[in-house]
Amino acid sequence: MPIYNPASLKAEEFINDEEIRATLAYAEENKNNMELINEILEKARPVKKERGYECRGLSHREASVLLACEDPAVTERIFKIAEEIKLAFYGNRIVIFAPLYLSNYCVNGCLYCPYHLKNKHIPRKKLTQEEVRAEVIALQDMGHKRLAIEAGEDPKNNPIEYILDCIKTIYSVHHKNGDIRRVNVNIAATTVENYRKLKEAGIGTYILFQETYHKESYEHLHPTGPKSNYAYHTEAMDRAMEGGIDDVGLGVLFGLELYKYEFAGLIMHAEHLEAVHGVGPHTISVPRVKHADDIDPDAFDNSITDETFEKIAACIRLAVPYTGMIISTRESEEVRSKMLHIGISQVSGGSRTSVGGYTEKERPHDTEQFDVSDQRTLDEVVSWLMDNGHIPSFCTACYREGRTGDRFMSLCKSGQILNCCHPNALMTLAEYLEDYASPETKEKGYAMIERELERIPKEKVRAIAEQNIADIRSSNRRDFRF
């Protein structure tokens, strides 16, 4: 029987089934223990310091107790503290990105994904480098600066060399005032050597969803293909960080297994990265199983309500306060709106989940990985964010200034990241407004920038940001950053 050890490099020791089950039993036993719950909530609250805020975070057991508690008043307190934490470390900024699907060739047999090998009626497609270039131009014409590239696992059609060529092509495209300044990568678990190659290619975050931390369920859901190896997949982040990638992104696909089990496993994985590498995940994504070609989400009997989904996100924010949180266009506008106030710091916008979808006038559905619930344009998403008091940010400065991994986390924990992120968000928003926004969004955006400039505490930083924004408006000068 594997023994729980967060500092182990073995999957079944740092994601330990016995420890998760003991955690769920402990949470159930204490879900009405208000004295303990009050102590946990107090521990989670951000504390104002002379410079910034401090948060202690929560252990997987403490966070699981909060998730298990069914008292509506406690849930409201969880939401309130989650919003306090989000504002303390990320302010009212929301980073925007888009996925770019390179290929849907895949040799795996994943039961929840339409790209599985046995699906013979989905058209298979792989972008050429010219097609990648065309997709990038289409994304730049929308206003995007940050992409997350996606590809199925297929050593023959999608080898690491193909991924590296695509990254090189993406960074090479300079169209009008458009540039993709950060490429995050969501591809299958691979070797340390290949992670080193991705690092050398200049990627931002390496993202890999666990899908489920329940080993038995994992093996059932992945009956064939290289992804069926639970340990190799679960240990991928350690290999990525050994390969020099500072920023890694976790996530589970909620709905495949019981959500309380997944939640505990997810927080344990974050604790493991902290214990071994001294820095937790850069991001955590919260996707849910959605309808797609050949996939019926009702076939999975662990689906969760919107209310439960929102509580999961809030509890993640309390447990790992410094980690970025991502929600995609899998979710509706209504759900995404609620989630923005309880911890989410990144959203996708104007997304298409099909291979080659951005160059098509009408949204193609035949090669989609999942149905997109929020089908608004990027301009509509930018306008919506501002209507809700959020600054749409296209900033990639930290990554390009070397503020990654523990360097980013130390700035975040000290509160100093606010002196970079707030003005950077406003300057990148000004770029969007000048080059891509509708007249209505442009007017709304500059009104927001004028208000938000006053909130920059350092007079020198504010003066530089004001001058840079004036230069953006009066010339083609771009890419200012702190």
Image (cartoon, rainbow, N blue to C red):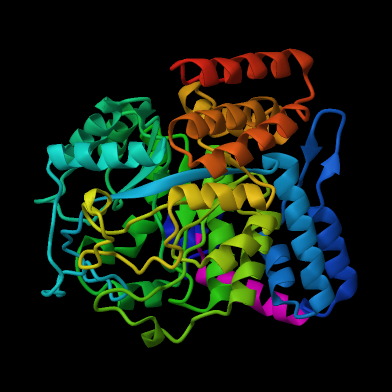
**What range of the chain is rendered magenta?**
15-29
Tell me if 194 is positioned left or right of 98 in this view: left
Q: Residue at position x 66%, y 69% from top?
A: 311
Quarter where residue 152 is shown:
bottom left
Q: Does 319 appear above or below 451?
A: below
Quarter where residue 123 is shown:
bottom left
Front position in the image: 186 or 142: 142
Q: Residue most toward the front?
A: 439
Q: Residue at position x 77%, y 19% from top?
A: 458
- Which is the main secondary structure of the residues drawn in magenta? helix
User: Could you tell me residue 128's position as x and y percent?
Assistant: 12, 43
Quarter where residue 338 is shown:
bottom right
Any magenta on residue 448? no
Front position in the image: 12 or 443: 443
Q: Residue at position x 21%, y 36% from top?
A: 133
Q: Residue at position x 54%, y 64% from top?
A: 333
Tell me if 407 is positioned left or right of 375 in this view: right
User: Could you tell me residue 136's position as x and y percent?
Assistant: 28, 38
Q: Does 306 appear above or below 387?
A: below
Any magenta on residue 21? yes
Task: Answer yes or no: is residue 415 visible.
Answer: no
Front position in the image: 272 or 284: 284
